[in-house]
Image (cartoon, rainbow, N blue to C red):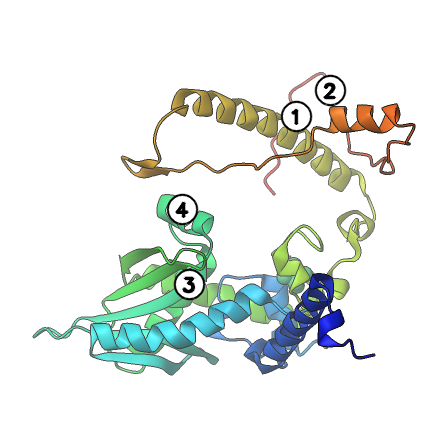
Amino acid sequence: MTIAPEAMTSDDLRAILDVAVEDMWVRADLMHERGWQPELGISALGGCEREAAYIIAGTPPSDAPPPTRAAILGTWLHEKILPLLADSLGGCEVEGTLFVDGLKGHSDLYVTLRRPDGTGIVVDLKTCTESAISKARRLGPKRNHNWQVHGYGKGRRDAGQRVDWVALLYIDRARGEHYVWISPYDEAEADAAMRWLFDVRAVAKRNPDLAPRGCRGPGLDWKADACKWVTRCWPDRQKTIRTELDDQGPAIEAALKMRLEGSEREADGKSDKSFAEAILDGLPEGEYGPYRLGWRSNGERMNQKVAAERLKRHGLEVPRNAATYSARVTYIGDQPPEETTS
Ligand code: SF4
Protein backbone atom coordinates (compact mmCIF):
# COMPACT_ATOMS: atom_id res chain seq x y z
CA MET A 1 0.00 0.00 0.00
CA THR A 2 1.36 3.42 -0.94
CA ILE A 3 0.82 6.19 1.58
CA ALA A 4 0.06 9.64 0.16
CA PRO A 5 2.91 12.03 1.14
CA GLU A 6 0.56 14.38 2.97
CA ALA A 7 -0.80 11.44 5.02
CA MET A 8 2.65 10.36 6.20
CA THR A 9 3.62 10.61 9.81
CA SER A 10 7.11 10.82 11.20
CA ASP A 11 6.73 7.13 12.18
CA ASP A 12 6.01 6.20 8.53
CA LEU A 13 9.08 8.12 7.35
CA ARG A 14 11.23 6.61 10.07
CA ALA A 15 10.06 3.12 9.07
CA ILE A 16 10.93 3.80 5.40
CA LEU A 17 14.42 4.97 6.38
CA ASP A 18 14.90 2.05 8.80
CA VAL A 19 14.08 -0.45 6.04
CA ALA A 20 16.40 1.35 3.60
CA VAL A 21 19.27 1.29 6.10
CA GLU A 22 18.81 -2.45 6.77
CA ASP A 23 18.74 -3.04 3.00
CA MET A 24 21.90 -0.95 2.63
CA TRP A 25 23.69 -3.22 5.15
CA VAL A 26 22.55 -6.34 3.30
CA ARG A 27 23.88 -4.90 0.01
CA ALA A 28 27.09 -3.82 1.69
CA ASP A 29 27.56 -7.32 3.08
CA LEU A 30 27.04 -8.88 -0.36
CA MET A 31 29.73 -6.56 -1.75
CA HIS A 32 32.04 -7.31 1.16
CA GLU A 33 34.84 -9.75 0.51
CA ARG A 34 34.03 -11.76 3.61
CA GLY A 35 30.71 -12.70 2.02
CA TRP A 36 32.45 -15.37 -0.07
CA GLN A 37 33.94 -18.69 0.99
CA PRO A 38 37.23 -17.75 2.56
CA GLU A 39 40.69 -19.16 2.21
CA LEU A 40 43.13 -18.79 5.03
CA GLY A 41 45.07 -15.56 4.69
CA ILE A 42 47.98 -13.91 6.47
CA SER A 43 45.48 -11.85 8.48
CA ALA A 44 44.37 -15.07 10.26
CA LEU A 45 47.79 -15.65 11.87
CA GLY A 46 47.41 -15.83 15.64
CA GLY A 47 43.60 -15.66 15.52
CA CYS A 48 41.18 -18.48 16.34
CA GLU A 49 42.92 -21.82 15.75
CA ARG A 50 39.66 -23.68 15.21
CA GLU A 51 38.32 -21.24 12.64
CA ALA A 52 41.64 -21.41 10.79
CA ALA A 53 41.54 -25.22 10.94
CA TYR A 54 38.00 -25.28 9.49
CA ILE A 55 39.14 -23.08 6.61
CA ILE A 56 42.22 -25.20 5.93
CA ALA A 57 40.19 -28.44 6.09
CA GLY A 58 37.53 -27.03 3.75
CA THR A 59 34.83 -27.67 6.39
CA PRO A 60 31.47 -26.43 5.05
CA PRO A 61 30.17 -23.47 7.09
CA SER A 62 27.29 -24.23 9.45
CA ASP A 63 26.09 -20.61 9.57
CA ALA A 64 25.61 -17.53 7.44
CA PRO A 65 26.24 -14.76 9.97
CA PRO A 66 24.58 -11.37 9.54
CA PRO A 67 26.52 -8.41 8.14
CA THR A 68 29.57 -7.57 10.23
CA ARG A 69 29.08 -3.84 10.31
CA ALA A 70 32.34 -2.96 12.01
CA ALA A 71 34.22 -4.91 9.33
CA ILE A 72 32.25 -3.22 6.53
CA LEU A 73 32.91 0.23 8.01
CA GLY A 74 36.56 -0.76 8.38
CA THR A 75 36.76 -1.70 4.69
CA TRP A 76 35.22 1.60 3.63
CA LEU A 77 37.63 3.52 5.84
CA HIS A 78 40.57 1.56 4.42
CA GLU A 79 39.49 2.49 0.89
CA LYS A 80 39.59 6.21 1.71
CA ILE A 81 42.44 6.36 4.20
CA LEU A 82 45.13 4.25 2.53
CA PRO A 83 45.52 6.22 -0.74
CA LEU A 84 45.50 9.54 1.12
CA LEU A 85 48.03 8.27 3.63
CA ALA A 86 50.21 6.90 0.82
CA ASP A 87 50.16 10.32 -0.88
CA SER A 88 51.15 12.02 2.36
CA LEU A 89 53.99 9.59 3.03
CA GLY A 90 55.25 9.24 -0.55
CA GLY A 91 57.19 6.17 -1.71
CA CYS A 92 54.43 3.73 -0.68
CA GLU A 93 53.03 0.55 -2.08
CA VAL A 94 49.33 0.22 -1.22
CA GLU A 95 47.64 -3.16 -0.65
CA GLY A 96 50.45 -5.18 -2.22
CA THR A 97 49.75 -8.91 -2.60
CA LEU A 98 52.11 -11.12 -0.64
CA PHE A 99 52.64 -14.79 0.08
CA VAL A 100 54.13 -16.38 3.14
CA ASP A 101 54.35 -20.14 3.58
CA GLY A 102 51.43 -20.71 1.21
CA LEU A 103 49.22 -18.00 2.74
CA LYS A 104 48.13 -15.04 0.66
CA GLY A 105 47.66 -11.56 2.07
CA HIS A 106 47.22 -7.93 1.18
CA SER A 107 49.55 -5.67 3.07
CA ASP A 108 48.05 -2.20 3.61
CA LEU A 109 51.20 -0.10 3.15
CA TYR A 110 54.85 -0.70 2.44
CA VAL A 111 56.81 2.48 3.00
CA THR A 112 60.34 3.02 1.76
CA LEU A 113 61.72 6.12 3.36
CA ARG A 114 63.43 8.50 1.00
CA ARG A 115 66.76 8.19 2.73
CA PRO A 116 70.06 6.87 1.45
CA ASP A 117 69.62 3.62 3.38
CA GLY A 118 66.05 3.07 2.03
CA THR A 119 64.56 1.93 5.36
CA GLY A 120 61.53 -0.30 4.74
CA ILE A 121 58.41 -0.24 6.97
CA VAL A 122 55.36 -2.47 6.75
CA VAL A 123 52.26 -0.67 8.06
CA ASP A 124 48.87 -2.18 8.77
CA LEU A 125 45.80 -0.07 9.47
CA LYS A 126 43.34 -1.10 12.18
CA THR A 127 40.09 0.79 12.56
CA CYS A 128 38.78 0.25 16.07
CA THR A 129 37.12 1.72 19.14
CA GLU A 130 38.58 4.28 21.51
CA SER A 131 38.92 1.66 24.23
CA ALA A 132 40.81 -0.68 21.86
CA ILE A 133 43.33 2.12 21.27
CA SER A 134 43.64 2.71 24.99
CA LYS A 135 44.32 -1.02 25.47
CA ALA A 136 46.86 -1.15 22.63
CA ARG A 137 48.70 1.82 24.14
CA ARG A 138 48.91 0.16 27.55
CA LEU A 139 49.40 -3.49 26.63
CA GLY A 140 50.70 -3.43 23.06
CA PRO A 141 48.95 -5.03 20.09
CA LYS A 142 46.95 -8.25 20.22
CA ARG A 143 48.88 -11.36 19.14
CA ASN A 144 46.83 -11.57 15.95
CA HIS A 145 47.70 -8.01 14.90
CA ASN A 146 51.36 -8.43 15.80
CA TRP A 147 51.73 -11.70 13.88
CA GLN A 148 49.74 -10.41 10.94
CA VAL A 149 52.05 -7.44 10.41
CA HIS A 150 55.11 -9.63 10.99
CA GLY A 151 53.64 -12.09 8.46
CA TYR A 152 53.51 -9.29 5.89
CA GLY A 153 57.05 -8.34 6.84
CA LYS A 154 58.24 -11.92 6.37
CA GLY A 155 56.43 -12.17 3.02
CA ARG A 156 58.23 -9.06 1.78
CA ARG A 157 61.58 -10.21 3.13
CA ASP A 158 61.12 -13.63 1.50
CA ALA A 159 60.45 -11.74 -1.76
CA GLY A 160 63.76 -9.90 -1.36
CA GLN A 161 62.42 -6.58 -0.09
CA ARG A 162 63.85 -4.66 2.79
CA VAL A 163 61.80 -4.63 5.99
CA ASP A 164 63.34 -2.96 9.04
CA TRP A 165 60.23 -1.99 10.94
CA VAL A 166 56.63 -3.08 11.34
CA ALA A 167 53.90 -0.68 12.42
CA LEU A 168 50.22 -0.81 13.34
CA LEU A 169 48.20 2.33 12.84
CA TYR A 170 45.10 2.25 15.04
CA ILE A 171 42.38 4.75 14.08
CA ASP A 172 39.32 5.24 16.27
CA ARG A 173 36.22 4.84 14.06
CA ALA A 174 34.20 7.33 16.13
CA ARG A 175 36.57 10.26 16.65
CA GLY A 176 39.36 9.66 14.16
CA GLU A 177 42.05 9.71 16.83
CA HIS A 178 45.02 7.51 16.17
CA TYR A 179 47.86 5.63 17.78
CA VAL A 180 50.96 4.24 16.08
CA TRP A 181 52.58 1.11 17.49
CA ILE A 182 55.96 0.54 15.90
CA SER A 183 58.60 -2.11 16.44
CA PRO A 184 61.77 -3.29 14.74
CA TYR A 185 60.96 -6.34 12.59
CA ASP A 186 61.38 -9.28 14.97
CA GLU A 187 62.38 -12.62 13.45
CA ALA A 188 61.23 -14.41 16.62
CA GLU A 189 57.65 -13.09 16.23
CA ALA A 190 57.54 -14.16 12.57
CA ASP A 191 58.87 -17.62 13.52
CA ALA A 192 56.25 -17.95 16.28
CA ALA A 193 53.53 -17.12 13.75
CA MET A 194 54.86 -19.78 11.37
CA ARG A 195 54.95 -22.38 14.16
CA TRP A 196 51.33 -21.53 14.96
CA LEU A 197 50.46 -22.10 11.31
CA PHE A 198 52.29 -25.43 11.29
CA ASP A 199 50.35 -26.61 14.36
CA VAL A 200 47.00 -25.48 12.96
CA ARG A 201 47.67 -27.29 9.68
CA ALA A 202 48.52 -30.44 11.62
CA VAL A 203 45.30 -30.39 13.66
CA ALA A 204 43.24 -29.47 10.57
CA LYS A 205 44.55 -32.63 8.91
CA ARG A 206 43.61 -34.83 11.89
CA ASN A 207 40.29 -33.24 12.85
CA PRO A 208 39.57 -29.48 12.84
CA ASP A 209 36.98 -29.94 15.61
CA LEU A 210 39.91 -30.68 17.94
CA ALA A 211 41.64 -27.32 17.38
CA PRO A 212 41.50 -24.99 20.41
CA ARG A 213 38.60 -22.56 20.40
CA GLY A 214 39.52 -18.90 20.18
CA CYS A 215 36.36 -17.31 21.54
CA ARG A 216 33.76 -17.63 24.28
CA GLY A 217 30.88 -18.66 22.10
CA PRO A 218 27.55 -17.33 20.83
CA GLY A 219 26.11 -14.28 22.52
CA LEU A 220 29.24 -13.75 24.62
CA ASP A 221 31.78 -12.89 21.95
CA TRP A 222 31.37 -10.93 18.71
CA LYS A 223 33.82 -13.32 17.05
CA ALA A 224 31.38 -16.20 17.56
CA ASP A 225 28.44 -14.17 16.34
CA ALA A 226 30.37 -13.37 13.15
CA CYS A 227 31.72 -16.90 12.66
CA LYS A 228 30.59 -19.20 9.87
CA TRP A 229 31.14 -22.30 12.02
CA VAL A 230 29.56 -21.15 15.29
CA THR A 231 26.83 -23.83 15.40
CA ARG A 232 29.27 -26.60 14.59
CA CYS A 233 31.75 -25.28 17.13
CA TRP A 234 29.18 -24.69 19.93
CA PRO A 235 26.30 -27.13 19.16
CA ASP A 236 25.02 -26.89 22.73
CA ARG A 237 26.02 -23.22 23.13
CA GLN A 238 28.40 -22.69 26.06
CA LYS A 239 27.18 -25.93 27.66
CA THR A 240 29.17 -27.64 24.88
CA ILE A 241 32.27 -27.24 27.05
CA ARG A 242 30.58 -29.63 29.52
CA THR A 243 28.58 -31.92 27.31
CA GLU A 244 31.49 -32.85 25.06
CA LEU A 245 33.32 -34.37 28.04
CA ASP A 246 32.69 -37.81 29.51
CA ASP A 247 33.44 -36.44 32.96
CA GLN A 248 31.77 -33.05 33.32
CA GLY A 249 33.18 -32.47 36.82
CA PRO A 250 36.37 -30.56 35.94
CA ALA A 251 34.53 -28.26 33.50
CA ILE A 252 31.87 -27.51 36.12
CA GLU A 253 34.46 -26.81 38.82
CA ALA A 254 36.48 -24.56 36.49
CA ALA A 255 33.31 -22.59 35.63
CA LEU A 256 32.35 -22.25 39.32
CA LYS A 257 35.84 -20.99 40.13
CA MET A 258 35.70 -18.52 37.24
CA ARG A 259 32.24 -17.31 38.34
CA LEU A 260 33.35 -16.81 41.93
CA GLU A 261 36.59 -15.04 40.99
CA GLY A 262 34.70 -12.93 38.44
CA SER A 263 32.28 -11.74 41.15
CA GLU A 264 35.16 -10.91 43.46
CA ARG A 265 36.98 -8.97 40.74
CA GLU A 266 33.75 -7.19 39.81
CA ALA A 267 33.19 -6.14 43.42
CA ASP A 268 36.83 -4.98 43.71
CA GLY A 269 36.53 -3.23 40.34
CA LYS A 270 33.38 -1.38 41.40
CA SER A 271 35.02 -0.35 44.65
CA ASP A 272 38.16 0.82 42.76
CA LYS A 273 36.04 2.77 40.26
CA SER A 274 34.05 4.51 42.98
CA PHE A 275 37.15 5.37 44.99
CA ALA A 276 39.01 6.69 41.92
CA GLU A 277 35.98 8.71 40.79
CA ALA A 278 35.69 10.25 44.25
CA ILE A 279 39.32 11.37 43.99
CA LEU A 280 38.79 12.74 40.47
CA ASP A 281 35.52 14.46 41.31
CA GLY A 282 35.43 18.04 40.01
CA LEU A 283 38.56 17.79 37.87
CA PRO A 284 38.21 19.30 34.40
CA GLU A 285 38.43 17.02 31.36
CA GLY A 286 41.94 16.88 29.96
CA GLU A 287 45.22 15.02 29.87
CA TYR A 288 47.02 14.04 33.05
CA GLY A 289 50.37 12.36 32.36
CA PRO A 290 49.66 9.41 30.03
CA TYR A 291 45.90 9.46 30.83
CA ARG A 292 43.01 11.42 29.41
CA LEU A 293 40.03 12.22 31.63
CA GLY A 294 36.58 12.73 30.16
CA TRP A 295 33.17 12.85 31.80
CA ARG A 296 30.27 10.93 30.31
CA SER A 297 26.71 11.48 31.45
CA ASN A 298 24.44 8.50 32.02
CA GLY A 299 21.57 10.70 30.94
CA GLU A 300 18.36 11.14 32.86
CA ARG A 301 16.93 7.81 33.88
CA MET A 302 13.54 6.74 35.06
CA ASN A 303 13.10 6.77 38.81
CA GLN A 304 11.63 3.28 39.02
CA LYS A 305 10.48 3.62 42.63
CA VAL A 306 8.52 6.83 42.00
CA ALA A 307 7.13 5.46 38.71
CA ALA A 308 5.89 2.29 40.44
CA GLU A 309 4.26 4.31 43.23
CA ARG A 310 2.42 6.52 40.72
CA LEU A 311 1.15 3.52 38.78
CA LYS A 312 -0.13 1.94 42.01
CA ARG A 313 -1.76 5.23 43.05
CA HIS A 314 -3.71 5.21 39.78
CA GLY A 315 -4.74 1.60 40.33
CA LEU A 316 -2.49 0.33 37.54
CA GLU A 317 -0.48 -2.86 37.72
CA VAL A 318 3.30 -2.40 37.80
CA PRO A 319 4.66 -4.34 34.79
CA ARG A 320 7.25 -6.94 35.71
CA ASN A 321 9.72 -8.96 33.66
CA ALA A 322 9.91 -12.71 34.18
CA ALA A 323 12.52 -13.67 36.76
CA THR A 324 15.97 -14.57 35.48
CA TYR A 325 18.54 -16.43 37.49
CA SER A 326 22.21 -15.77 37.99
CA ALA A 327 24.54 -18.17 39.71
CA ARG A 328 25.55 -17.64 43.32
CA VAL A 329 28.81 -19.36 44.08
CA THR A 330 30.60 -19.69 47.41
CA TYR A 331 33.71 -21.69 48.19
CA ILE A 332 33.13 -24.49 50.68
CA GLY A 333 36.48 -26.34 50.40
CA ASP A 334 38.74 -26.77 53.45
CA GLN A 335 41.92 -25.92 51.52
CA PRO A 336 42.62 -23.14 49.01
CA PRO A 337 41.69 -24.39 45.50
CA GLU A 338 44.43 -25.65 43.21
CA GLU A 339 45.54 -23.18 40.57
CA THR A 340 44.18 -24.03 37.12
CA THR A 341 46.28 -23.27 34.06
CA SER A 342 43.58 -22.83 31.42
S1 SF4 B 1 32.88 -19.96 17.00
FE1 SF4 B 1 34.63 -18.96 17.93
S2 SF4 B 1 35.94 -20.62 18.63
FE2 SF4 B 1 34.48 -21.49 17.17
S3 SF4 B 1 35.55 -21.44 15.21
FE3 SF4 B 1 34.32 -19.60 15.36
S4 SF4 B 1 35.70 -18.02 16.21
FE4 SF4 B 1 36.62 -20.02 16.60
Q: Secondary structure at mark 4?
A: helix
Mark 4: few, some, or many residues within 10 Å (few <14, many ≥20)?
Answer: some
121 horizontally vs 324: left or right: left
Select label 3 or label 2 by which is in front.
Answer: 3
What's the distance in space between the residues labelled 3 and 1, CA to CA? 41 Å
> Could you tell me how far apart the alpha carbons at marks 2 and 4 are, in whole angstroms?
39 Å
Residue 134 horizontal/vertical position (percent) = 40, 46
Q: Is residue 202 above or below residue 178?
A: below
Residue furthest to the left: 116
The quarter holding residue 277 reads: top left
* Quadrant, the C terminus: top right
User: Badge 3 is on which residue?
Assistant: 126
Give the residue pinned by disc 4: 134
Which secondary structure lies at badge 2? Answer: loop
Q: CA distance from mark 4 to mark 1?
A: 34 Å
Q: Pick out the residue farthest to the top.
A: 334
The quadrant of the picture showing ligand 1 is: bottom right
User: Would you name the residue on which mark 1 appears?
Assistant: 337
In depth, the one of 33 and 166 nearer the eye is: 33
**Label 2, on which residue?**
333
